[in-house]
Image: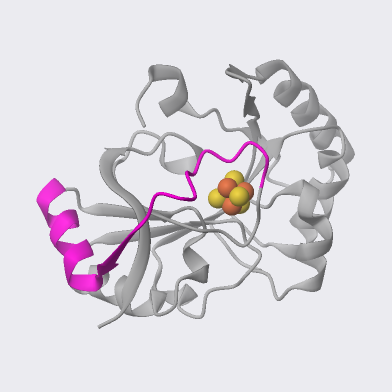
Amino acid sequence: MANYHIHRIFSSIQGEGRNVGRPVTFIRFAGCNLACRWCDTHKDERMLLTEDQILNRILFYGNKSVILTGGEPTIQHELGVLVQKLKDAGMWVALETNGIKAPSCQELFDYIAVSPKSHYLSRYLDNIMIHKANEVRIVAETDEITAFCKTMRSRIEAENYYISPLHSDGRIHYRRALRLLTKVNKIMSDVMPPWCLSIQMHKIIGVR
Ligand code: SF4
């Protein structure tokens, strides 16, 4: 039986992207292969749990949907074993990943959301990154993201593409996100569907 580095398992609703409002249990893994400056994952708090221990906690919360998030889930060894266990228990299982690494168990997921980080462009170009997903979400950090959005759009085939406002220094930067969204859609006016805004609803209503 494998062990997984877990930061926290908790019940909530999905707050962003296509599945906003869906009741889910989040498995928040510890550790990441990137180090974004605004990251809200407390890298030092972690516990080691087996698949059975994780499944018991999932069943305790009673949600039928599970989202694997981070930290970065794809750096966990034996991720496929855990996902198969959740699927065997009848769960809808989604992955939230930074997309640097394509998981070997990609076909097991019911939904994949990729959130590439623009300040790590060279890492994406150097790695065998993920190339297919259900949605792509890019945080509106700086004006640089317009070119990054174009590059990621050409590299990741998805059904929906979103821009999210940056949350930093206790503020959510909506205006910048809207300005960059308009700019990105102007630059990519020839591709469909257009980029849309994904607000982080859980941060607005104050749920984790
Ligand atoms: S990719 Fe996500 S989990 Fe990793 S450092 Fe950046 S914000 Fe944190």
Picture quarter containing residue 168?
A: top right
**Image x and y of residue 14, in percent:** 38, 39
Picture quarter containing residue 95?
A: bottom left
Left or right for 67, reference 89: right
Q: Nearer the viewer, residue 72 or 180?
A: 72
For the view shown, which residue lies furthest in the front direction?
44
Q: Nearer the viewer, residue 162 or 76?
A: 76
Quadrant (top left, top right, bottom left, bottom right) of the C terminus: top left
**Image x and y of residue 165, in percent:** 64, 28
The residue that appears at 72% across and 22% down in the rendered structure is 178
Q: Nearer the viewer, residue 164 or 185?
A: 164
Picture quarter containing residue 11?
A: top left
Q: Is residue 151 visible?
A: yes
Chosen colour scheme? one colour
The residue that appears at 32% across and 39% down in the rendered structure is 22
Q: How many marks?
A: 0
The residue that appears at 76% across and 64% down in the rendered structure is 124
- Report the span colored magenta: 36-62
Q: Is residue 70 part of the magenta span, yes or no?
A: no
Q: Is residue 136 visible?
A: no
